[in-house]
Image: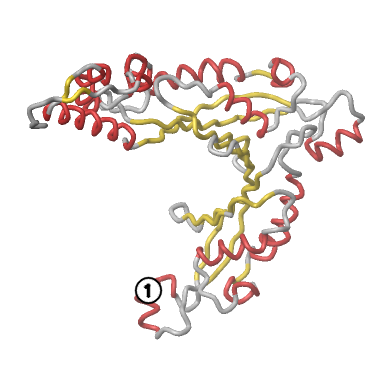
Amino acid sequence: MNPAKTPMRVDFPAPFSPRTAWTSPARTSMPTSARAWTEPYRLETFRTARIGIKGWLDYAKFAVGAIFLLMRRLVTLTRKVSFSSGHRYWDEGLSPEENKAVFGRWASPFNHGHNYVLWVSARGGVDQATGMVVNIKWIDDLLQEKVVSVFDQKSINDELAAFKGQVPSVENLLRFFAKELDDLPGDAELVALKLEETPLLYGEWTKENDMVSITRVYEFAAAHRLAVAELPEDENYRLFGKCHNVNGHGHNYVLEVTVSGDPDPKSGFVCDLDAVDSVVEAEIVERYDHHNLDIDIPELQGKNTTSEIVAAAIFDRLQGKLPANLLRVRLFETARNVFEVTA
């Protein structure tokens, strides 16, 4: 019997029927080219078809289209929104002394306010018909509904039911926004949030590990000279140019220190920020500020003090000394040069 002339019957298992897959919302985000390949060749068609060579070619085109869907490139977009709110760190059930013990220098029965800035990051495949992961206006509408209209010009402790019994810390606000914004429009998925309370304090949330982190920002001014002792002068100048100036040069460094952990149920804080400040000021800022990194800092002596080396030295010096897990050190040498060391 000639197999080329005798078609065989192929029954595909029912779970793979596209009857539900092709009516699901996910279909709307499918790249146009993939839809064009796969739509004419629905698996249900094959369930009762007698497939010859042409049938197998058709099925191969369907399989390629499916693989294309799995391998499509994901893009992350970030949208920023601002709102102004007041809040306070104060538990009416505690004495002033107990409030001070829980909230530190931020403890007060009176409100203070912030101009908050929230960055919302969404990820998804690019719809080839629109060229977008999701219509940015849909994101704006959601942020106006879920964030701005709820928080702007409000006292969080007094006017938001969700915070009647919860401290409105950056950490808790991030958790709240993560729940409120979890169902983004279209095929976009919420993957990260960043909430800036002040220019010197911001928090981040990532969906991948449901982690909350807090970042403090510091500054110090220091001098250095880039040089590799084993190289001749002409080679050092070739490598480092003006940064090899014989008398050195300086920078106004900006240092970000990021810690992570589970927020304390009483304070709402990942850790005592005063304790973080004390460690960073003592170990880094006071030691580095207005000093020559090549000469005055023991852990940098004998090294070529590139910002890569300095950032790593700062990370090593802080590790194990902070009241929470050290997640990241980010060092801005200039507005254009940023160096990051992570755990």
Color style of the picture: secondary structure
Quadrant where the N terminus sits is: top left
Residue at point 32% right, 37% down?
71
Q: Is residue 278 left or right of residue 42?
A: right
**Quarter occupied by residue 199:** top right
- Foreground of the two, 177 or 250: 177
Q: How many marks?
A: 1
Q: Residue furthest front?
A: 1
- Foreground of the two, 338 or 289: 338
Residue at point 42% right, 26% down?
188
Residue at point 44% right, 75% down?
245
Q: Is residue 43 left or right of residue 56?
A: right
**Quarter occupied by residue 234:** bottom left
Residue 270 at x, y percent in the picture: 71, 40
Residue 73 at x, y percent in the picture: 33, 37
Residue at point 45% right, 56% down?
337
Q: Is residue 168 left or right of residue 110?
A: left
Residue to which mark 1 is pinned = 239
Q: Where 159 falls versus 77 (above or below)?
A: above
Residue 22 at x, y percent in the picture: 32, 17
- Amino acid type assigned to the residue bearing label 1 in the image: Leu
Residue 62 at x, y percent in the picture: 23, 28
**Neighbour class for label 1 at 10 Å: few (<14), some, many (≥20)?**
some
Quadrant where the C terminus sits is: bottom right
- Foreground of the two, 206 or 93: 206
Label 1 residue SS: helix
